[in-house]
């Protein structure tokens, strides 16, 4: 009987979760709290469209209107060329999809810790779950908006080739691009609330310095290396390459630069978030 009690005591001690555990145990905690992660993601999806007039259709309207505006301004008025045979509208929408995903994920994750302050201040769980859940919510919007791409391809009679099989790789890259800055801004916003004003400005500026309404091939070669430091350049070029039959072709030098910047930002975001995570409950 005493052996059974001691074993039960050992098991109970293993279930106690405390802040400051080893790194390996932290990632195990993430898996242990996977149900909380799914719950928060599902809650964010329900809350986003609660009491809205047209509901989940907002996920389609925003990228569609962006595509129409950019097609008219850059394609009709500015007469910017479309690489290859793909219609200009499809070229723009292929870039709008990952951009909307990135901008939505960054904006939502930056405020995620503040909006969940009551939960964070009361119980312990790996805080990384909160901003990660908002990225999943933005990905759901991305999948819904992706249906418009299918409609456009049918309308313009455009059929992708085998390269579309590589699209999940660029979707994963978009996840990484959104997660790195998202974690960094989410942690900074807990202490410095000014970042809630900085993020919309970054998103608005990034829309015009990223090749959403135009092809990155129009950028002069001497500035291409600097332009590729924007990690969304690699994501957008990858999406277009996968959906537009390899037109325009991928500049692998630019892609390597974008991958390197993405990796650095992801590491910095995770490390800084983990460094200040234990202070969130006191500050928030």
Image (cartoon, rainbow, N blue to C red):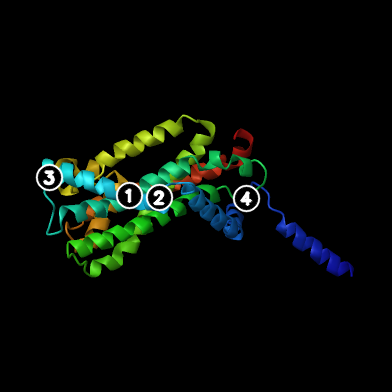
Q: Nearer the viewer, residue 137 or 231?
A: 137
Compared with 177, 153 (above or below) is below
Q: Which residue is mark 4?
A: 125
Q: Which residue is mark 3?
A: 76
- Sequence-wise, the earlier of marks 2 and 4 is 2
- Sequence-wise, the earlier of marks 1 and 4 is 1
Compared with 227, 85 (above or below) is below
Tally the numbered discs: 4
Mark nearest the camera among 1 and 3 is 1
Residue 139 image position (x, y, % from top left): 41, 55
Q: Nearer the viewer, residue 228 or 38?
A: 38
Q: CA distance from mark 2 to mark 4?
A: 35 Å
Q: Which residue is mark 1?
A: 61
Q: CA distance from mark 1 to mark 3?
A: 21 Å
Mark nearest the camera among 4 and 3 is 3
- Sequence-wise, the earlier of marks 2 and 3 is 2
Q: Which residue is mark 2?
A: 54
Q: Secondary structure at mark 3?
A: helix
């Amino acid at each position: 009987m005493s052996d059974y009690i001691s074993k039960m005591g050992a098991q109970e001690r293993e279930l106690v979760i405390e802040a400051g555990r080893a790194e390996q145990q932290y990632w195990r905690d993430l898996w242990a709290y996977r149900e909380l992660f799914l719950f928060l993601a599902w809650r964010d999806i329900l809350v986003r469209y609660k009491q809205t007039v047209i509901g989940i259709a907002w996920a389609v309207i925003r990228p569609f209107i962006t595509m129409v505006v950019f097609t008219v301004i850059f394609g009709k008025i500015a007469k910017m060329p479309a690489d290859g045979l793909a219609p200009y509208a499809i070229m723009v929408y292929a870039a709008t999809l990952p951009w909307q995903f990135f901008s939505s994920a960054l904006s939502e994750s930056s405020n995620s810790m503040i909006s969940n302050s009551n939960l964070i201040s009361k119980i312990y769980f790996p805080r990384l779950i909160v901003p990660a859940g908002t990225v999943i919510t933005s990905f759901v919007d991305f999948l819904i908006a992706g249906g418009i791409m299918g409609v456009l391809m049918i309308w313009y009679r455009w059929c992708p080739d085998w390269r579309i099989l590589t699209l999940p790789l660029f979707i994963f890259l978009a996840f990484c691009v959104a997660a790195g800055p998202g974690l960094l801004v989410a942690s900074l916003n807990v202490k410095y609330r000014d970042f809630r004003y900085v993020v919309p400005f970054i998103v608005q500026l990034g829309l015009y310095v990223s090749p959403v309404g135009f092809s990155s091939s129009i950028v002069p070669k001497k500035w291409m290396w600097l332009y590729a430091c924007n990690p969304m350049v690699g994501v957008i070029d990858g999406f277009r390459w996968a959906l537009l039959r390899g037109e325009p072709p991928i500049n692998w030098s630019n892609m390597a630069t974008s991958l390197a910047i993405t990796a650095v930002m992801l590491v910095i975001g995770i490390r800084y978030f983990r460094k200040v995570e234990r202070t969130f409950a006191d500050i928030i």
